[in-house]
Amino acid sequence: QVHLVESGGGLVQPGGSLRLSCAGSGFIFSRFAMSWYRQAPGKERESVASISSIGGQIKYAESVLGRFTISRDAKNTVYLQMNSLKPEDTAVYYCNAVSLYNSAVNYWGQGTQVTVSS
């Protein structure tokens, strides 16, 4: 059974940092591109950052460029380092895995809440 489990969310002051982790199981991690999405109250879910299966291709939303860094290890975890956080970064952050061979095969985590507030 496939699982994606996010962790690392919480409450942080503006300008602070958080590191999100997403651990995958039940699928071959190296054959999936990984992404982080977020959804703020009343807004649509949006892509934040993505990384290819071997980490060679990385993309960021313009709103997080220079502040967020996505990475992955060789085992089963993808990370999102978030620096210089702003109140508008407040959202539920979701991990997503998409198969290299069939984009219809994709999995979602349950989400982790990030709140940026003083």
Image (cartoon, grey):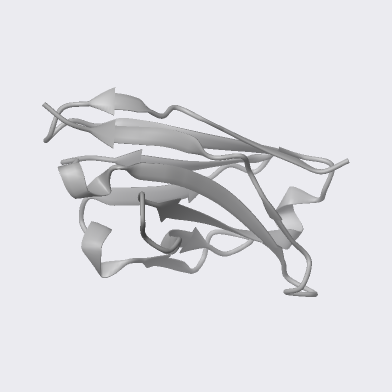
Total number of numbered labels? Answer: 0
Look at 79% across and 74% down and name the residue there.
Answer: 101
Q: Residue furthest right?
A: 1
As drawn, 13 above or below 56: above
- Residue 117, image x, y percentages: 17, 31
Q: Is residue 98 visible?
A: yes
Q: Which of 46/19 is in front?
A: 46
* The quadrant where residue 61 appears: bottom left
- Residue 30, image x, y percentages: 72, 54
* The quadrant where residue 31 appears: bottom right
Which of the image's four quarters has the C terminus? top left
Which of the image's four quarters has the N terminus? top right
In-image side of 88 versus 106 (left or right): left
In-image side of 53 versus 93 (left or right): right
Q: Is residue 65 visible?
A: no
As drawn, 101 above or below 32: below
- Residue 85, image x, y percentages: 19, 41
In-image side of 73 versus 31 (left or right): left
Look at 56% across and 48% down and name the residue there.
Answer: 95
Look at 48% across and 62% down and name the residue there.
Answer: 50
- Residue 54, image x, y percentages: 61, 60
* The quadrant where residue 82 appears: top left
Look at 73% across and 70% down and name the residue there.
Answer: 100
Q: Residue furthest front?
A: 42
